[in-house]
Image: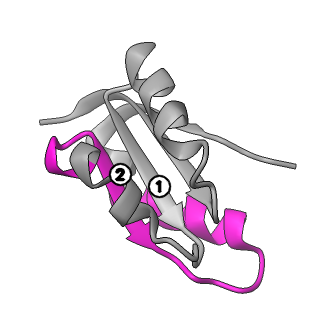
Amino acid sequence: MPRYASICAIAKDEDPYIVEWAEYHLSIGFEHIHVYDNGSARPVRDILREYMDAGLVTVVDFPVEVEQQPAAYADCLAAYGAGTEWMAFIVHR
């Protein structure tokens, strides 16, 4: 079933914040979150397992070394873009 609003983000070693971040975005109406894990010491899938099991989060292992954000977001759009009406890309500068 297509979603109305999803998020795509890339993360690395965000253990202290990622659960709160996911909870916040789900609470304001995003239906699904795609997190690209860029080689975190503690894998994001271990931290967000409960949300993955509930079908709210997809974690993609993405240990790319060069220009991680553009590569992850291009992959996310290609893989999941057709399944959502709107997709937000969270960018950290």
Upstream in the sequence, badge 2 or badge 1?
1
Q: Which residue is drawn at 20% across and 35% down?
A: 2
How packed mark 1 is, by other alpha carbons closer than 10 Å (few <14, some 14-19, many 20 or more), is many
Given residues 78 and 92, the one toward you in this image is: 92
Up-down relation of residue 60 to residue 17 (above or below)? below
Q: Position of residue 26 (x, y in %)?
A: 39, 24
Image quadrant in which you'd find residue 89: top right
Q: Which residue is drawn at 50% across and 63% down?
A: 36
Label 1 belongs to which residue? 35
Q: Label 2 belongs to which residue?
A: 48
Residue reaching furthest right? 93
Is 16 rendered above or below residue 47? above
Q: In which quarter of the image is the N terminus?
A: top left
Residue at 52% across, 77% down? 62
Residue 19 vertical position relative to residue 75 in the rendered view, above or below: above
Secondary structure found at label 1: strand
User: Is residue 23 part of the magenta span, yes or no?
Assistant: no
Dot 2: element: loop
Q: Is residue 67 visible?
A: yes
Left or right position of 12 against 86: right
Which stretch is magenta?
A: 52-79
Furthest-top residue in view? Answer: 28
Mark 1 belongs to which amino acid? Val
The relative height of residue 41 versus residue 1 in the rendered view (above or below) is below
Which amino acid lies under the numbered mark 2 shown in the image of this protein? Leu
Quick check: marks 2 and 1 in contact, CB under 8 Å? yes
What numbered label is drawn on residue 7? none
Q: Position of residue 6 (x, y in %)?
A: 41, 35
Comparing marks 2 and 1, which lies closer to the viewer? 2
Q: x%, y% of residue 78? A: 43, 62
Measured Cα–Cα span from mark 2 to mark 1: 10 Å
